[in-house]
Amino acid sequence: MVDKMAQIAGEVVMDDKPGLALKNWRERLKIKQIDMAKEMKISSSVLSDYESGRRRSPGSQFIKKYVEVLVKLASQHNRFLDKNLEKKYSEAILGMKDFSEPIKVSFMIEKTNAEILTGEEFLNYNLYGYTVVDSIKAIYLLSGFDFFKIFGTTTERALIFTKVGMGRSPLVAIRVSPLKPRMVIIHGPKKVDPLAIDLAKKEKIVLALSNMKDEEALISSLTLEKAFS
């Protein structure tokens, strides 16, 4: 239970709108606002003000108390906290693998039928894994703590984003994140936003555009039994 509280609190703290993030968790777990307020020994109006952002962003002590009460009430009502925590993450992550032996960036380029947009000087660098992310679902479902989980056990990996529009959003997200991947592959755009390329250069990240015909073909190229043996 302590791990679940830490996970929720981590997401809330990292969110741009922590009050709204708290409310989202409460509603996701179907806990009534009046029950939360009663358990926290505050009025429903005060709680509503925090959740809506009418009051200043809640401090760490408020968030800690809120999450403790939320987890307590969810457990009492058998609201399956684990399922709610993992559902949004599993929907956004299409594939993930850590390699027993590293592969070269150049090999990943070949496997995903990609063209390098920037980072040619890093072709001989090692990769220790990959994560395939549905960029649309990631925008709607992942934030804070969840985003960090896409790095698996190492940042020396390729993050592969599907359903990409112009390529700006994934690179902006990486730009503001303290964790940086070795490589980013985007799939979907016919033309890549110059800002995405510029951000990749600034972060010294390999950026490539996959020319696989569709998302299914891209994922298949990564999941073949001997693709990374």
Image (spheres, rainbow, N blue to C red):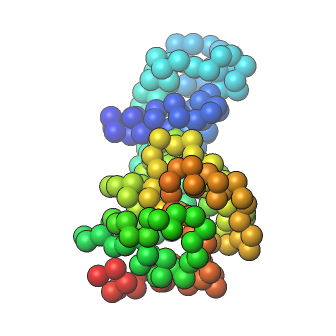
Q: Is residue 190 above or below residue 201?
A: below
- Dividing the picture into quadrants, the one containing residue 114 is bottom right
Along the line of sight, the residue nearer the viewer: 198 or 15: 198
Rendered residue at 38%/58% (across/down): 156
Kindly identify the residue that appears in the image at 52 percent across and 63 percent down: 119
The correct choice, above or below, for 193 with respect to 9 in the image is below
Rendered-image quadrant of the C terminus: bottom left
Residue 7 percent location from the top left of the image: 42, 39
Q: Is residue 82 left or right of residue 177?
A: left
Does any portion of residue 160 appear in the rendered image?
A: no
* Residue 129, position as x, y percentages in the image: 37, 66
Q: Nearer the viewer, residue 144 or 158?
A: 158
Residue farthest front in this picture:
121
Name the spot of residue 33 as percent of width and height, x first: 62, 27
Where residue 53 sits in the image (x, y, percent)?
A: 69, 24
Counting every numbered tag in the picture gives: 0
Which quadrant of the structure image shows residue 26? top right
Q: Quadrant of the N terminus?
A: top left
Residue drawn at x 62%, y 81% as measured from the top left? 211
Is residue 1 visible in the rendered image? The answer is yes
In this view, the residue in front, 216 or 208, is 208
Q: Can you say whether 116 is above or below 2 in the image?
A: below
Which residue is rendered at x = 60% and y = 83% of the image? 212
In the picture, measured across the screen, residue 226 lies left or right of residue 140, that is left
